[in-house]
Structures are given as structure tokens and as C-alpha cells.
Amino acid sequence: MNEKRVTFASKIGVVAAAAGSAVGLGNIWRFPSQTADGGGAIFILVYIGCILFFGIPLMVSEFLVGRSSRANTAGAFHKLAPGTPWKWVGRLGVLTGFVIMGFYMVVCGWTLDYLIQAVAGQLHTETDFAGRFTALQNNPLRQIVWMIAFTLLTAFFIISGVKKGIEQSAKILMPMLFLLLLILAIRAITLEGASGGLAFLFKPTMEHVKPTVFLDAMGQAFFSLSIGMGCMITYGSYFNNHTNLTKTAIQVSVLDTLVAILAGIIIFPSAFALTANSATIVDELVAGGPGLLFITLPGLFNQMPASMVWAAMFFCLLALAALTSTISLMEVVTLYIHEEYLLSRRKSTLLVTAGVIVLGIISSFSSSFFNFLDITSAKFMLPAGGFFICLFVGWYLDKKLVHDLSMD
Ligand code: PHE
């Protein structure tokens, strides 16, 4: 099976594919709402600490496990530590990927729904975006249709093969998204009243510290970097022997963090500038919860000439960034079934797709189920998986192997 495994063709493909997995709704949708909840600047500080001290080393570890085993997440542990319980770490990762898809696909569906609304010209006449988002949340059927569409789209890419699907799309789309975010950020900070949002983002105040800030920031860091579940093990298994693992991990993490901070610079200044009552703005941001992005941004677009075009472009690129992440999630679970149970790639994909759709339907009906999947995966499963992967690389694996592999 090893000979048949494909590897990424070019260096830029390696970074682009891993960054494509990392950059997604986690940065643009989840990061702002977690930041609002975590009190702004103080959350961001702890978050950056988590990226530096846990995120980057763990990403290098995952790449290393993947490249030295050239197997799927669960198979990697099986291969490097045959006959030991380490394989359960891989299995936990596969399960985590499945749980994440169970709510992530619903948010992907929202982005498609908003894309259509933007193209149909429904957003630029609206004044009550909170009401508009609530209407979507109260309509499970509408959410389910889009969630299924997105899951099938992901499955299509998985079936059509690794190289063509992932590498090519990521290389073109990521820079486009980045550019668009830059333009939106400039517009947001030049709005009148934007400075309050910038202060909330960058001036830490002790009154905002919450006892859970560390766990929240760590969960967000793991989620955003796609680490702790073996996603980067699967990607590492496609790297060729000349890929510099440490350099790649640093590049991916810097890119990912830049996109998240940019999303913050877009959303908070807009929210502060565009809200009528600035005294209650922080409470409103927290109450916005998972809707924050979808409530705040259409308001910003309406402050720009040709708002329809900006809105359509944004939701289109957002959906594509989400797609490169869902591809990586589905790849982990599919490859596990494909390589461990020897089902064809197609059959494995269809099985995973059906399972994800079932979870997605329940999440669309119940926001508490949605939150349960979100919290369990980001705050518990990913950190637990990350902890065991670190133990595995730092303690179980042969030191020489680790040293040689991470240095070349
Ligand atoms: N990192 C992705 C994002 O930020 C989500 C993800 C998590 C993807 C875990 C793969 C694995 O949107």
C-alpha cells in the first residue's frame, strides 16, 4: 500500500494544503465569537501563547508521526507501536474528526445559505441582521438542505483524489481569501467609531478575565490549527522526505493566526461602529454567539459601494476556505476506514458522508446538541488527543528517529 501513496508535488503545495486545512471557519467564524466570549484582548494573548507553546510543537509532532509511518491516523500508531494500546490515540482522533464534522458542516451550510442570499440581493436591503440570522436558526429544514449539499461537495473531492482536489484548490483560493480579508479589514477600521472595537481586541483589561480562559483559548488554538486529532498526521503522511517539518509548522501557524486576527480586526470594529447602543455592545457580542459573523458582516458590506459584490465574494471564499477544512476532516475518517477495513475509497467516503449527515441533521434541530459537539471536540477531545500525541513522540518514540526526522 505504501508504494501507491501519493505525495504532494511541490513545496508550496505542502504548505498550502496544510494551511488550507487550518484556515477555515475556525478562524473566521469561531475565533471572533470565542474572543467576544473570552473578553477580547486577554483571550487573544492567551491564545497566542497556546499557539507558540503547544500548537507549533504539536503540529511538528503530528507531521513526524505521519511521515515516518506513511499511514492513516490510526494506522500510524499501529505501525510505529505495534501491539500496544497507542492505536487508541489514533482512533480517538478519527472519532474527533467525525464529531467536528457533525456541527461544522451545519455552519458550512450557513455560509452557502448566505452566499445565495447575497447573490439574490437580499442582504443589502436588510436592516435587522440579528433577526435574519435567527430566522435561519429557527428553520432546521433550510439548514439541513445546505448542510447536506456541503457534505456531498466535500465527499466529491474526497472521491476524486488527494492531489487534484486538495492541492490545486488550496493554492489559488488561500491568497484570494487573504486579500479580500485585508480589504475588509481596512474598510472596518476606517468606519467612524471603530476604535472601540480595536481597543477591545488589543487592550487587555483584568475585569474580562474568566477562569476558563485558558481552556477556551487552548481549545480554539487546537481547533484552528487542526491539531490534536491526527489531521496533520494524515497530511504528514503525504509529505516527501525533503519537507522541513518545523519550518512548515511555523509557516502554517503564522498564516492561520494572521487570518484569525484579521477576522477579529474586521468583525469587532464593525460591530462597535455599527451598533446603536455602544454601552451594551460587549454583552451583545457575547449574546451573538455563533451568529456573530453572520450578523455583523452583512452590516459592514452595506457600508461599502457595491455591497452585493463584496458580500457574494466574501461568502464564496469563506465557503471555499471551509471546504479545504472539511476535505481534511473527511479525509482523516475516510482514510481510516479505507486502509483499516479495506473498503474501497468510494464506499468508505459514502459511509462517512451518511454518518456526518445524520449528526448534522440532529445539530440543525438542536442548538444544544450543536454546542455539545463543539465544546466536547474543541475543549476536551482535541486537547486530550494532543496530550497523548506529545507523549507518544516525546516519550515512546526512539529519540534518534525523532531528532533526525524533525531536523532534515
Ligand atoms: N482548522 C479548521 C478551521 O479552523 C477546522 C479543523 C479542525 C479542521 C480539526 C481539521 C481538523 O476551520
Image (cartoon, rainbow, N blue to C red):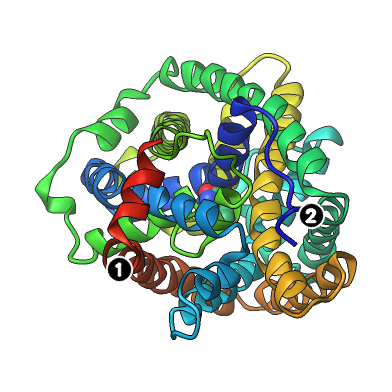
Q: Please give left or right for residue 404 compared with residue 312 in the image.
A: left
Crowding around mark 2 (Cα neighbors within 10 Å: few <14, some 14 to 19, many 20+) is many
Amino acid carrying label 1: it is: Leu
Closer to the chain start, of discs 1 and 2, is: 2
Q: Please give left or right for residue 363 compared with residue 247 in the image.
A: right
How many labels, in total?
2
Q: Please give left or right for residue 223 compared with residue 40 in the image.
A: right
Q: Quadrant of residue 167?
A: top right
Check mark 2 vs ligand 1: CB closer than 8 Å? yes or no: no
Can I make out residue 201 in this image? yes
Residue shown at 60%/33% (left/top)?
Answer: 16
Residue designated by label 2: 154
| 407 and 193: which is toward the camera | 407
The quarter of the rendered structure image containing the C terminus is top left
| 124 and 340: which is toward the camera | 340
Residue shown at 85%/59% (left/top)?
Answer: 152
| 109 and 275: which is toward the camera | 109
Can I make out residue 125 in this image? no
In this rendering, is residue 307 above or below 217? above
Q: Secondary structure at mark 1?
A: helix
Where residue 288 sits: x, y (%)? 48, 54
Where residue 314 sits: x, y (%)? 67, 31
Where residue 110 sits: x, y (%)? 71, 53
Q: Quadrant of residue 279?
A: top left
Spatial separation of the CA atoms under disc 1 and disc 2: 33 Å
| Residue 391: mark in rendering | 1
Amino acid carrying label 2: it is: Thr
